[in-house]
Amino acid sequence: EPEVTQTPSHQVTQMGQEVILRCVPISNHLYFYWYRQILGQKVEFLVSFYNNEISEKSEIFDDQFSVERPDGSNFTLKIRSTKLEDSAMYFCASRARANYGYTFGSGTRLTVV
Amino acid sequence: GESVGLHLPTLSVQEGDNSIINCAYSNSASDYFIWYKQESGKGPQFIIDIRSNMDKRQGQRVTVLLNKTVKHLSLQIAATQPGDSAVYFCAEKYSNTGKLIFGQGTTLQVKP
């Protein structure tokens, strides 16, 4: 069964450093998403991406965050200057069509120290 | 504001019993709802979904019920097994971009 792949599985970074979280969505999918989950809390929407541009973003997704789909296969989330409160699980998701279901990756655990 | 919430944070059931997990949603315009299972250290795993033009959908051992009148969603798991122990989230598709709003999550504990 096709999977959404995320790397790394765990990233530790110092506060103020830049991090890039990587995702390889399912190959024929067109819609891409990033979500995050702070430990013990619910999954929160960050951003949706379609046709090479952001289609919607949440209040969390401020100027420190950016997304890219640089080569048609990878979908990346960059945090420019990490803060302690950015520590969370970050999930990538994709779906094929507007009325199709979503597939989530296993997540990257980001720890900011 | 937007919110999808769950009534019970923890549900403990005996193996073999049926489980019912409930969820309230706030956006009457949401047209698609999903139940996810999340095991420790893993991403949300799709269980079952339902569109707003339906009120019931069945899968293997799982049933989702949608009551649009009171904006309520439930997940029924038949003959609950130890492998069903996990956190269960409901989610609603909140906009045309496909943004999902997740509930808080219910922890299901299955006692052998």
Image (cartoon, coloured by chain):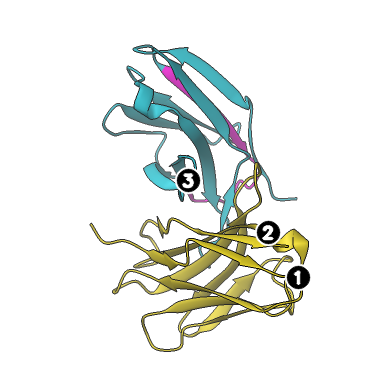
Chain colours: A yellow, B cyan
Residue identifier under label 1:
A15
Residue at 52% across, 16% down: B12
Q: Nearer the viewer, residue A62 or A12?
A: A12
What is the span of residues highlighted in magenta in the rendered image? B19-33
Report if residue B95 is visible in the image.
no
Q: Nearer the viewer, residue B54 or B6?
A: B6
Any magenta on residue B91? no
Q: Secondary structure at mark 3?
A: strand
Q: Nearer the viewer, residue A32 or A56?
A: A32
Closer to the camera: disc 1 or disc 2?
1
Place of residue B110 in the rendered image (x, y in percent of width and height, measured from the top left): 44, 18
Quadrant including the N terminus of chain A: bottom left
Chain letter of disc 3 in the image? B
Q: Secondary structure at mark 2?
A: loop
Place of residue A91 in the rendered image (x, y in percent of width and height, measured from the top left): 51, 60
Place of residue A94 in the rendered image (x, y in percent of width and height, measured from the top left): 41, 65
Q: Secondary structure at mark 1?
A: loop
Quadrant including the C terminus of chain A: bottom right
Q: State left or right for residue A72 relative to residue A68.
A: left
Q: Which mark is residue A87?
A: 2
Query: In the rendered image of this protein, does residue A34 appear above or below residue B13?
Result: below
Which residue type carries mark 3? Phe
